[in-house]
Image: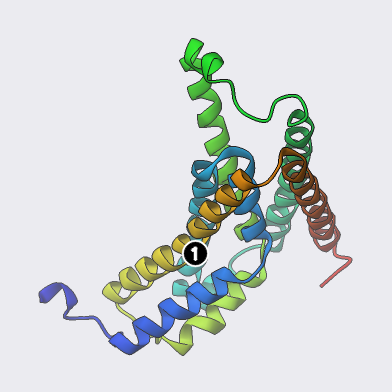
């Protein structure tokens, strides 16, 4: 096929890359915590939006890796630090929202369908706001990880020749990343939602509070690193 004429990736390399990306995405991390907590508190859709934000962040870093080391060096230090500060602030907000959600679970453990049907516009607005928040959570966590750029620059050459890869190679790598990373994170969202349905409200409340504490500690760690107190 003419479209695949300039494809240099072998089937073995594509399969190995997909497996490696999926395994790395499955490792416990802040992104996994973000997806699961959003799914636990807002349903599978909210977890899916967080997963989409993570995938978009990975796409951005893949684009930087495609530009090579010269593109990486052009990123100013203040921009990287600003991204970390913004991610830390967002994590604090998310931790506070999770803590508030846990407190509200003592009053009502299930949404009132009558209230939702009585004001469908308000319900839709709330869903849209939650989707934006979930997407921003996944995106900000990924972009705040400065090591991700170096990771992609060091990881991709094991599968792709970054000096000579073609546009078709890039499209294939982006597709593999989206399916592998997004699929794994979406699986976490579905699993968290199903587990939450089996848990008692008290245990759900405990999980949300634990996640809020972990996110707050992660925000403190990001802030310390942004201040230059950690490498």
Residue 38 is at least partly visible in this image: no
User: Please, which colouring scheme is shown?
Assistant: rainbow
Along the horizontal axis of the image, is 51 left or right of 38?
left
Residue visible at 36% across and 87% down in the picture:
13
The vertical placement of 113 against 45, above or below, is above
Q: Is residue 182 above or below residue 22?
A: above
Image height of 25 relative to 206, above or below? below
Front-most of residues 43 and 204: 204
Residue 1 in sight: yes
Identify the residue at horizontal 42%, vertical 81% (top origin): 17
Viewer-closest of 92 and 46: 46
**Which SS class for mark 1?**
helix
Which residue of the protein is positioned furthest toward the right in this rendering? 229
Which residue is label 1 attached to? 184
**In terms of depth relative to the viewer, which is nearer, 137 or 188?**
188
Query: Residue at coordinates 66% horizontally, 72% vertically from top-left?
Result: 147
Q: Report the front residue among 35 and 77.
A: 35
Q: Position of residue 151 (x, y in %)?
A: 59, 77
Residue 91: horizontal and vertical position, in percent?
A: 73, 47
Query: Which residue in the rendered view is the most extreme toward the left?
Result: 1
Image quarter of the N terminus:
bottom left
Q: How many C-alpha atoms fall within 10 Å of the one at disc 1: few (<14), some, or many (≥20)?
A: many
Q: Is residue 191 above or below residue 13?
A: above
Q: How many marks?
A: 1
Name which quarter of the figure residue 204 lies in. top right
12 sits to left or right of 48: left
């Amino acid at each position: 096929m003419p479209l695949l004429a300039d494809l240099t990736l072998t089937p073995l390399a594509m399969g190995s890359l997909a497996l490696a990306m999926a395994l790395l995405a499955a490792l416990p991390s802040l992104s996994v915590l973000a997806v699961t907590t959003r799914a636990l508190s807002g349903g599978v859709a909210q977890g899916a939006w967080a997963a989409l934000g993570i995938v978009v962040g990975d796409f951005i870093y893949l684009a930087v890796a495609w530009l090579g080391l010269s593109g990486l060096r052009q990123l100013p230090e203040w921009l990287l630090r600003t991204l970390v500060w913004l991610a830390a602030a967002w994590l604090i907000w998310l931790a506070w929202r999770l803590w508030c959600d846990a407190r509200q679970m003592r009053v009502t453990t299930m949404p009132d369908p009558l209230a939702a049907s009585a004001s469908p516009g308000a319900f839709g607005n709330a869903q849209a706001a939650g989707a934006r928040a979930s997407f921003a959570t996944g995106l900000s966590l990924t972009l705040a990880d400065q090591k991700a750029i170096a990771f992609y620059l060091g990881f991709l050459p094991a599968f792709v020749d970054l000096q000579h890869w073609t546009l078709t190679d890039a499209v294939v790598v982006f597709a593999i990343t989206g399916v592998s990373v997004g699929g794994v994170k979406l699986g976490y969202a579905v699993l968290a939602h199903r587990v939450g349905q089996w848990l008692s409200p008290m245990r759900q409340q405990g999980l949300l509070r634990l996640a809020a504490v972990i996110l707050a500690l992660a925000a403190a760690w990001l802030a310390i690193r942004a201040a230059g107190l950690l490498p």
